Image (cartoon, helix red, strand yellow):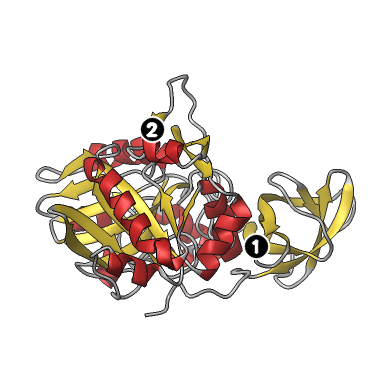
Amino acid sequence: MLDGTQPTNEAAPARSPLHDRHEALGAKFAEFGGWEMPLQYSGIVEEHNAVRTAVGIFDVSHLGKIVVRGPGAVAFVNATLSNDLGRIGPGRAQYTLCLDAETGGIIDDIFSYYRDDEHVLLVPNAANNAEVFSRLAAAAPDGVEVVNHHADYAVLAVQGPKSDEVLAAAGLPVGHDYLTFVEADHDGHPVIVCRTGYTGERGYELIAPSEVAPQLWDAVLAAGEEHGILPCGLGARDTLRTEMGYPLHGQDIGPTVTPNEARLGWAVGWKKPEFWGREAVLAEKERGPRRKLVGIVSTGRAIPRPHMPISLVPDVRLGEVTSGTFSPSLKQGIGLALIASVVADDGEVAVDVRGRREVFKVVKPPFVDTSVRES
């Protein structure tokens, strides 16, 4: 989850434990969620294509890390976050949402890792980690501990069709099913190897103590050299996730957007008796949301950008672009847009691209075929 929300304070951005490695590789940096992270190394398109065709490695240590543990930890998380942990079990991961209790707006989208009945690891977006932690800590019952480990762990994403070969050569376990994880050892240090990612390609995310990150990064890069591995920045991560139609918090989703509007109802445990925002989103589901998040594809050469107005006829605004980019895979402009529900899912809309009305097709993402779920 690349975090598009910018911090509001004046504090210097935090740095990854791999910052020196990125500098040595000539990375260009940008601020993401209060962290100074690599934007690109050799170039966004080259890095994007490496992930689609071979393998890339990303540092996403800016992502949050919150541990919920103690008797009743799973039940507590299940009574607060949207998805239903009853659908999975230990050793599995799940995409879920932290919703505002009153409005049902999306405070954050999160991956939860069900370690055992008394231990859940949550990975929020960087800029929202403190807010999610604060809400969970305030609501935790006696006996359930909520611990903020934001800077204590690094996260490396190894993504692409050659990711299995690379991690196997680095001595890490591979081949487990999508949305599962294995707790492993690498040179005497614990590493969680997760079959998750934000690119749409087969891949893994490695969660390890921050002090282990440099040697783990070096080992994976060395193992991947013969497979064409490239270090990749968050610029390529953004184009890859846009091609999949994965929403970005702070752009496509946020506190003013509900899971019904974002078409994330599959991440809601509708039959659960309790979760934050349940009444609000159930009522909205019953009456139908006013807006919906859709994919758009240019019929010409236009490239959409966030906040560009969308209409069907001139001067009747029906929404706006939330994410937009040039797709390196399709060689055309694509994006996500939040528009009025009355617009047909297979229709056309006009996007105001710097004063020009450009025609875009409305489509259902993903925009490209990928191998993310292959076993």
Q: Amino acid at mark 2?
A: Arg
| Residue drawn 36% across the image and 65% down it | 269
| Residue drawn 77% across the image and 47% down it | 309
Instruction: Tell me the CA gap for discs 2 and 1.
Output: 34 Å
In the image, 54 versus 15, the foreground residue is: 54
In percent of width and height, residue 179 lies at 33, 69
**Most distant residue in the top direction:** 10
| Residue drawn 59% across the image and 69% down it | 366
Residue 130 visible in the picture: yes
**Disc 1 secondary structure class:** strand
In the image, 1 versus 96, the foreground residue is: 1
| Residue drawn 46% across the image and 33% down it | 36
**Most distant residue in the front direction:** 226
Q: Amino acid at mark 1?
A: Val
In the image, 90 versus 189, the foreground residue is: 189
In percent of width and height, residue 48 lies at 57, 59
Residue 287 visible in the picture: no
Classify residue 227 by image quadrant: bottom left
Give the quadrant of the C terminus: bottom left
- Is 3 left or right of 295, judged from the image as shown? left
Query: What residue did someone put label 2 on?
Result: 15
**Disc 2 secondary structure class:** strand
**Dot 2: few (<14), some (14–19), or many (≥20) neighbours within 10 Å?**
some
Instruction: Please tell me whether residue 103 is drawn above or below residue 366 in the rendered image.
Output: above
Instruction: Please tell me whether residue 344 is drawn above or below residue 262 in the rendered image.
Output: below
Closer to the chain start, of discs 2 and 1, is 2
Q: Nearer the viewer, mark 2 or mark 1?
A: 2
Number of numbered labels in the structure image: 2
- Is 297 left or right of 190, judged from the image as shown? right
In percent of width and height, residue 125 lies at 41, 45
Query: What residue did someone put label 1 on?
Result: 294
In percent of width and height, residue 342 lies at 73, 64
